[in-house]
Image: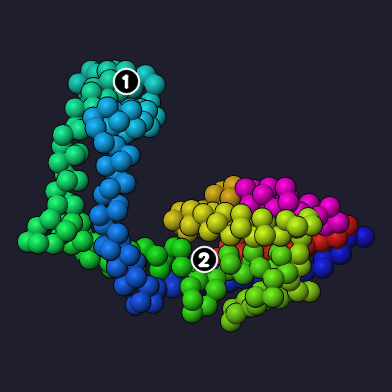
């Protein structure tokens, strides 16, 4: 008969504003590295030829996916014509693209990359708000670790695994589910995957279908590294199965873990 050896539910807060120093650090880091950012851009796309192959053609390929096959515009243009004209327009825009970026990183009034730095300062509030609504809710910060960080520690029995206000230990404690010597690999891969999946779920208003899809990705990853002594990780909330899943309970989002032995 199967046995639940570990189960925990981590709460994901509705919002987590970044600390003031985090916003300052984000802005300061970008501004202090302005010239390096521009140099990397110039090395990556130094001329029109590289612009055509790295930006224009790739952009056009992505853009054409948004034009349905068989589509005809109000002016009678077919999908192939629209795609072709869009590609030509993108390819002709190198000078405009180059000039805009050169202006952003130009020295003005004795200040290197003045326009770029002004844009960073103008975007401080937007960055803080976006981070508070998505990433920080999942990862936490130096003030307190978030659900995705705690989940990685919990599933590798790291001594940093704790529970916070709003979290619930259902049974047992942290359990290392990774195969021998792969606990660091599990933790290193799981945390960013949980973050990426969580951000998508939050951005899409906790859409049930998306939650199910992301849970499948998360558990397929864990399954590839887990010990065989545990029931395989899978995406459904079942009492006899191991899982690491996002769950919507009422209007709140949780990250719930269960580890089961056969």
From the image, state whether disc 2 or disc 1 is nearer to you: 2
User: 64 or 224: nearer the eye?
Assistant: 224
Screen quadrant of the N terminus? bottom right
User: 1 or 150: nearer the eye?
Assistant: 150
- What residue is disc 1 on? 79
Where is residue 75 drawn, in percent x and y?
19, 21
Regarding residue 90, the answer to whether it shows in the image is no
Identity of the residue drawn at 28% across and 48% down: 39
Where is residue 35 drawn, in percent x and y?
25, 54
Regarding residue 166, the answer to whether it shows in the image is yes
Compared to 61, does 191 lie above or below?
below
Spatial distance from mark 2 to mark 1, Cα to Cα?
A: 41 Å
In the drawing, does residue 97 fall left or right of residue 160?
Answer: left
Task: Give the class, few, some or many, for how many residues have Cα within 10 Å of label 1's Cα (few <14, many ≥20).
Answer: some
Task: Mark 2 or mark 1: name the one nearer the start of the chain.
Answer: 1
Q: Which residues are magenta?
A: 216-239
In the drawing, does residue 38 fall left or right of residue 11?
Answer: left
Identity of the residue drawn at 53% across and 58% down: 195
What element does badge 1 sit on? Answer: helix
Where is residue 26 drawn, in percent x and y?
34, 66
Q: Is residue 52 magenta?
A: no
Rendered image: mark on residue 236: none
Task: Give the class, few, some or many, for how many residues have Cα within 10 Å of label 2's Cα (few <14, many ≥20).
Answer: many
- What residue is disc 2 on? 138
Identity of the residue furthest to the right in this view: 1
């Amino acid at each position: 008969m199967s046995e639940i050896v570990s189960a925990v539910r981590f709460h994901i807060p509705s919002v987590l504003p970044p600390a003031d120093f985090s916003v300052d650090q984000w802005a300061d880091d970008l501004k202090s590295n302005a010239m390096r950012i521009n140099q990397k851009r110039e090395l990556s796309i130094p001329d029109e030829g590289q612009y055509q192959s790295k930006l224009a053609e790739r952009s056009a390929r992505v853009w054409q996916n948004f034009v349905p096959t068989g589509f005809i515009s109000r002016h009678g243009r077919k999908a192939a014509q629209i795609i072709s004209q869009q590609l030509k327009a993108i390819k002709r825009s190198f000078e405009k693209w180059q000039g805009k970026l050169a202006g952003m990183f130009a020295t003005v009034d004795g200040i290197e990359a003045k326009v770029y730095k002004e844009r960073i300062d103008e975007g401080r509030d937007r960055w803080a708000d976006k981070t508070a609504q998505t990433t920080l809710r999942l990862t936490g910060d130096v003030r307190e670790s978030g659900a995705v960080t705690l989940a990685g520690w919990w599933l590798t029995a790291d001594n940093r695994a704790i529970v916070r206000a709003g979290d619930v230990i259902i049974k047992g404690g942290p359990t290392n589910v990774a195969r021998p010597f792969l606990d660091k690999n599990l933790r290193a891969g799981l945390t960013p995957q949980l973050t990426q999946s969580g951000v998508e779920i939050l951005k899409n208003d906790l859409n049930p279908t998306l939650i199910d899809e992301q849970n499948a990705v998360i558990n397929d990853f864990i399954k590839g590294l887990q010990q065989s002594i545990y029931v395989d990780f899978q995406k459904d909330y079942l009492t006899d199965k191991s899982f690491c899943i996002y769950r919507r309970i009422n209007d709140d989002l949780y990250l719930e873990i269960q580890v089961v032995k056969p």
